[in-house]
Image (tube, grey):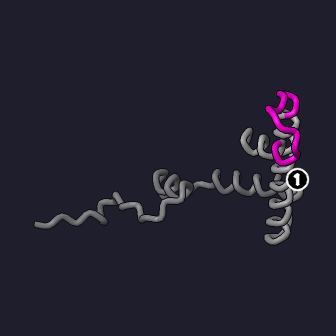
Amino acid sequence: MAFAASTVWAANGTGGTPSAAQVRKEVRRAVEAHRAQERDDIRREEAEVGRRLTPAERAELREQIRYQWLLPSKAPMSSRMGDALGSAGPVPSTAPEARHLAP
């Protein structure tokens, strides 16, 4: 960042080493430009995808997710945890009828 700033001052013909205040000012400008670019990118992506949820919609979605987590399930807890963590593999069954041992 400092190298880029020094090349800017060299290109402007100010020459010499920039002062600390000049460096701070240039870094602040660069950071603000970067943040503005990120905000624009986020807005553009949201426009492509759709829209943001309203606070009421987010609250409703959170309530639905909590309700789903509180529902009793017939699956073992480890299976539900695997689903929640996104495991793609099947969970082996521990039911007695599933274990067939060779004679």
Q: Position of residue 43 (x, y in %)?
A: 85, 62
Q: Position of residue 75 (x, y in %)?
A: 49, 59
The residue identified by callout 1 is 55
Q: Is residue 99 left or right of residue 7?
A: left
Instruction: Give the vertical position of 58 relative to 20 (above or below).
Output: below
User: How many C-alpha atoms fall within 10 Å of the one at disc 1: few (<14), some, or many (≥20)?
Assistant: few
Instruction: Give the vertical position of 88 relative to 37 (above or below).
Output: below
Q: Which residue is at 30% across, 65% downward?
A: 97
Secondary element type, mark 1: helix
Q: Is residue 100 left or right of residue 89?
A: left
Whether the magenta-drawn stretch holds residue 51 is answered as no
Nearest the eye: 27 or 15 = 15
Q: Position of residue 1 (x, y in %)?
A: 73, 42
Nearest the eye: 46 or 92 = 46
All told, the count of numbered labels is 1
Q: Which residue is at 36% across, 61% downward?
A: 92
Q: Which residue is at 41% across, 61% downward?
A: 91
Looking at the image, can residue 55 be seen? yes
Nearest the eye: 6 or 80 = 6
Identify the magenta region: 10-22
Amino acid under label 1?
Pro
Quarter of the image with the C terminus in it: bottom left
Q: Which residue is at 81% across, 61% downward?
A: 41
Looking at the image, can residue 74 be seen? no
* Location of residue 23 (image quadrant): top right
Q: Position of residue 83 (x, y in %)?
A: 53, 59
Nearest the eye: 96 or 94 = 94
* Extreme residue in the top direction: 20
Whether the magenta-drawn stretch holds residue 19 is answered as yes
